[in-house]
Image (cartoon, grey):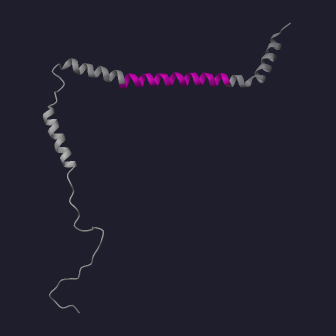
Amino acid sequence: MLTPRQSKNKRAILLAEYKEYERLHIISIAAAILIAVGVGVTLFFLYTNIYQSISKTREVLLTDPALNVETVDFNKYDSAIAAWEKKMNAETPAPTRDPFLFIAKPNATSTQQL
């Protein structure tokens, strides 16, 4: 026959024997909470950075219908590219002297040096 005293002793024996299971249970609950917080932060990040920027862009397009894509003048574009290529392919003049070589020149004075 089971008495309340025996069940308490049995529970005490089980708790002493399976103490690691309680720790694992607490760790699993903490891990589940951390995963839930991580998912929540990720969803908040996606909402603020993606969905709100899409909605703001849509609002701008709806409020100002005069916004259009500008056409590119390809003649001006080609002339600018040609000028850039001409500038980048221009030959640099050869150096007339070596800037890293120091040559001491004598003083050119009309007075006699002592």
Residue at (30% x, 68% y) in the render: 100
Rendered-image quadrant of the C terminus: bottom left
Quadrant hosting residue 9 = top right
Q: Which residues are magenta?
A: 24-49
Vertical relation: 54 (above or below) 105: above
For this orientation, the residue located farthest to the top is: 1
Vertical relation: 87 (above or below) 60: below
How many discs mark residues in the rendered view? Answer: 0
Nearer the observer, 100 or 114: 100
Image x and y of residue 95, in percent: 23, 64
For this orientation, the residue located farthest to the bottom is: 114
Left/right of residue 28 with respect to residue 13 in the rendered view: left
Image x and y of residue 101, in percent: 30, 71
Is 37 a magenta residue? yes
Rendered-image quadrant of the N terminus: top right
Nearer the observer, 14 or 34: 34
For this orientation, the residue located farthest to the right is: 1
Left/right of residue 31 with respect to residue 15 in the rendered view: left
Residue at (20% x, 19% y) in the render: 63
Nearer the observer, 18 or 101: 101
Quadrant hosting residue 108 = bottom left
Residue at (16% x, 44% y) in the render: 83
Residue at (81% x, 16% y) in the render: 10
Is 105 a magenta residue? no
Left/right of residue 44 with respect to residue 14 in the rendered view: left
* Magenta stretch: dominant secondary structure: helix
Image x and y of residue 104, in percent: 27, 78
Quadrant hosting residue 18 = top right
Nearer the observer, 75 or 34: 75
Image x and y of residue 97, in percent: 24, 68
